[in-house]
Image (cartoon, rainbow, N blue to C red):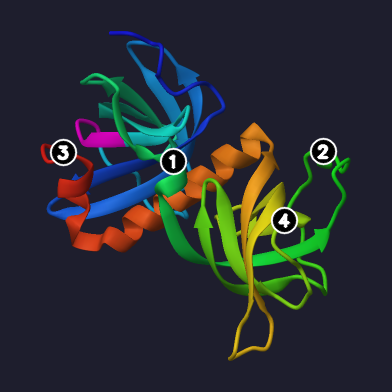
Amino acid sequence: MSMERFPTEDQFITAVTVRDGNAAVLAGRVLVAKERGIVVRFETDGEPLPPRGNAITLLYGGGDRVLRLRTTIAEVIDGAKLLLEPTGAVTEGERREFLRTDAEIDVRTEAVGPDYVLPGEASAGAPKPDWERQIADLSGSGVGFLWDGLYRKGDLVFVQMILPTPVPSAVNAIAEVVRASRDADSGKQRLAVHFTALDERDRDVLINFVFRKYYEQLGSRIGSVIDPDV
């Protein structure tokens, strides 16, 4: 089995498992990635992980595609980590930028120039007064949200988002405004921006969050969409 498109160490992944007809969507980070076994630490929120022998499908970014890898739980470690044994080849799913979801996030933005450089990695912390919590349209390539500003198509902006993961995750990006219109209900601008600069780690965090929310919203259809044999 080729390791070429296996998840890599420290990569964020989404895992989908179906047990007794109920689907569960988990988020985790890869600790070890080898051909015979992958160790993933999952965000559990205190809930028990699936037991040994349970089938579990991993979803993760690979180039511009969503990659899928079917595995079986070989061992539960420390209650928060799973040793997974691959049971099939890596397959390609939809393009990452086309996978999107609506989610409540904290967001802020400011205009920047063409020479602006993304700041280094920062912890999420608490949103500051100019952050707004709202339902945003998220994808791996951009975000749509409301903002009290006067932007025009083509403007460059610095966008900061805090995603409501178990440990809140901050994502920073430089983006180009591709649509800016007035929202009649709020009186604010409805912006759609396309990311032009996004740290790869932040992209993994964002893609993982979008995966998780998207597949959670599929509800009972999740088993057939992810893997008919899971």
Residue 99 in the image: x percent, y percent?
40, 49
Residue at the spot x=25%, y=44% of the render?
17
Residue behind mark 3: 230
Q: CA distance from mark 2 to mark 1?
A: 24 Å
CA gap between label 2 and label 3 equals 40 Å
Report the span colored magenta: 52-57
> What secondary structure is found at the residue carrying circle 2?
loop
Q: Earlier in the sequence, mark 1 or mark 3?
A: 1
Q: Residue at x 11, y 37 (%)?
A: 229
Residue linked to disc 1:
96
- Upstream in the sequence, badge 4 or badge 1? 1
Q: Amino acid at mark 2?
A: Gly
Query: Furthest residue to the front?
Result: 153
User: Is the residue under label 1 in contact with that under label 2 (CB below 8 Å)?
Assistant: no
**N-terminal-most mark, 4 or 2:** 2
The disc labelled 1 sits on which kind of residue?
A: Arg
Specify the amino acid type for callout 3.
Val
Q: Split into 4 quadrants, where in the image is the C terminus?
A: top left
| Mark closer to the observer (2, 1) | 1
- In the rendered structure, the answer to whether residue 139 lies left or right of residue 65 reads right
Q: SS class of the residue under badge 4?
A: loop
Q: CA distance from mark 4 to mark 2?
A: 25 Å
Report the residue at 25% width, 38% height from top. 51
Q: Residues within 10 Å of mark 4 (few under 14, many from 20)?
A: few
Q: Single out the mark in the foreground, 4 or 2.
A: 4
